[in-house]
Amino acid sequence: MTTTAETIHPPGTPSGRTAADAFARAARLEALLGDPYDPANPHGLRALFAADARRVPPAETESLLAGTGLGAEFVPAVHGGRLTRADLLVRALRPVFRRDVALGFGYGITSLFAAGAVWAAGDARQRQDVADLLLRGGRATILHHELAHANAILRHEFSARATARGYRLDGRKDVIINAARADLQVVYARTGTARGPRSHSVFLLDPRCAPPGSVRHLPRVELPGMRGALFSGLEFTGAPVPAGALVGGTGDGVGLALRVFQVNRSVICGLVTAAAGTVLDAAVRSAAGGRGATVTGRRRAPLAGVFADLLAADAMSMVVLRALSLLPDRAHLFAAAVKYVVPDLLREGLQELATVLGARGFDHAGPEHGALDKLVRDLPVAGLGHAGSASCQAVLVPQLRGLAERSWFAEDEPPSGLFRADGELPDLDYRLLGIAGGGDFMAASLVGSAARLAGARGAPGARGALAGLAEAFVTELRALREQCRRLPASGTALAGPAALVLADRYTGVVAAAAVLGVWEGQDGTDPFLAGPAWAVLALSRLAGRIGVPVPTLPAGVQEEVLGELLRRQRAGLGYDLDAVAHTP
C-alpha cells in the first residue's frame, strides 16, 4: 500500500476543528503503524527497540510518517495545515508517541516547537514560508538560548551582532536535535549585553544559504535516552544573517520563548502520558499473563494506582491544552504547573511498574516488554527532567505571593467548557498567549467543585470520600494563602527550599482541581469516568504526595479502578481519558 497525505487525511474531510476529526486521524495513523505487538511489524515495538539499540532512527517508520503528511499537523489551518487546537493535535499524534517518544521528537513535534515563534510573531511571508516547508515534509529544529539549570540541550547559546546588512551570528551548541538534517533552523540568539527580558532575539536560518566557513557541523552526540533521535552540534563563526530573518522585533526572544514554551510544555505532557500507557499495558500483560486473565496479590495496588495517576496526568494535560484556546491570556501559570507535576507522576508511576515487571521491564528481546527501560531513559532527554522542573519553578514561585493576595478565594470560576472534551473552542492563536498576570482560574475551579460536593461530605462510599478530599484540598489552599502572603516580593529566598516546597504543594492543588473539573464535566457517556472511584483514587495519591491528610479508601474503589484497567486491556483501549482503541 502506498501511503500518502491523502491516506491519513482524505480530500474533503474537515481540517481538524473537531474531536471526531482528530480521533479519525489518530485511528488512520494507528492502522498504518499496525499492531505494536506483532514481532513481524516493521513499525512495531520490536523494530523500534532494535533501532534504539543500534542508535539509529527507524528509517522505515519515518518514511511512513513522511508519506502521511504529518507536517500538516504543525501548520495552522489558515496556512493550509491541520493545526487548530492543541488538545486535538495531541489526540492526533498519540499513536506515534505511544510507540516511541524518540520517533515523535525526531520526526515530528520538534518542528512545531521550532515553528511556534513564527506562529506567534512572524510576518506574513515568514509564516507562509515555514508553512510551505512543513507541508512538503521539511523539518525545522530549534536552537534554544541557555537557561539556568540547563541540561545538555539547553546549555550554551549564540550571539547575534547587528551589521549594515543584518546580523553576524557566533556561538556554539553541542546538542541540537536534527541539527544535521533540518531544513530550517530557528535560533534564539543573544542580541543584548545586559541580562533581562530584552536580551535575545529569534532568527530563521536556511542551512543551504550559509557561506563556506561560517558554520561547522559538530559530531553526533550520544545521549542516554532517545538514542534513535539524531543529536549533534553547530558552531557559527561570523555567519551572516539577513535582516529579514528576524522574527518579530529585536529583543523579543525571551517573550516569544515564554509564549511558545507554554504550548510546548503542555503538548509534551499530553503526548508522553500516552507513552507511559504503553508501559502500563506491558505491566498488565505481565501481571495477568496476557489478555482475559485477572490480577491477584500485591500487583493490584500499583496497577490501579498508576492507572489513576495516568488519568490525573491526562486530566491536567487536556485542561491546559484547552485553556490555551479558551483562556489564552491566563494559561501560562497552569502550563508551568502541569509540566511540573506530570513528569513526577510519570516517573513515580514507572518506579511502581518496575516492581510489577521486574527484570522483564528491561528485556528488549520481545515486543511485550522493554518499554519501561526505554521510557525511563527517554523522559529526561524529552525535557521532563531536572532542567524542565527548574524552569517551571522559575515561572511559578515569583507569582505565588500575588496569587495569595489577590486571586485565591476571590476569582470567578472558568467556563465549564474548559473541562468538557467534546466542547467547541476557538482555534489556538499563539499571538494571544499571555506571559504574566491573569489570576488563577484553577484555584477558583477547585473551590467551586468542593462547594458543589459539600452536601455529600461525610456520606458513606466513594462520593462522600470525593467530597472530603475536595474539601481537604481547599483547606490546603487556605494554608497556602497564609504562607505565600509571607513570601518576599523578590530576592534569593524565592529560590530557597521553603519557596520550592510551597510550589510543590500549590501544583498538587492545581492537579486536584483538574481531576475534579474533568470528573464534573462528564456527560455520563462513559460510566467509569462519570463515577467517583477513579477521581477518589487519583486525589488520594495526589494528596499523599504533598502531605494532605488522606482518609482510608472506601471499599470497592481500588477494585473498580482495577476492573476498568483490565477491561481496557482486554479490549485494546487506551489508558487515558479518551479510552480509544490502540491495539487490535
Image: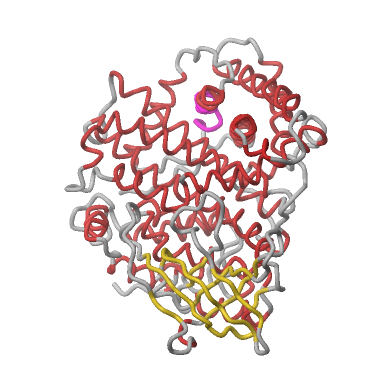
Magenta residue span: 527-538
On-image quarter of the N terminus: bottom left
Q: Position of residue 177 (x, y in %)?
A: 42, 65
Q: How many marks?
A: 0
Give yes or no for residue 541 being in the magenta stretch.
no
Q: Specify how the rendered protein is coloured.
A: secondary structure
- Find residue 309 and report its horizontal and vertical position in percent: 47, 33
Left or right side of 286 for 449:
right
Q: Is residue 59 left or right of residue 153?
A: left
**Relative to 33, does residue 436 appear above or below in the rendering?**
above
Residue in the foreground of this view, choosing between 118 and 145 = 145
Q: Main secondary structure of the magenta part?
A: helix
Which residue is pictured at 43% across the width and 89% down the height?
A: 212
Relative depth, front residue between 210 and 328: 210
Residue under the image location 68 percent in, 80 percent down: 124
Corner quadrant of residue 556 = top left
| Quarter residue 163 falls in | bottom right
State the residue in front, 326 or 479.
Answer: 479
Q: Is residue 212 above or below residue 221?
A: below
Q: Is residue 415 left or right of residue 171?
A: right
Question: Which residue does the image show at 23% across and 62% down from the upper left?
Answer: 42
Rendered location of residue 501, percent (x, y): 60, 30
532 in magenta: yes
State the image coordinates of residue 353 (x, y, percent, origin top left): 33, 33
Residue 393 vertical position relative to residue 145 in the rendered view, above or below: above
Nearer to the camera, 430 or 185: 185
Which picture quadrant has residue 404? top right
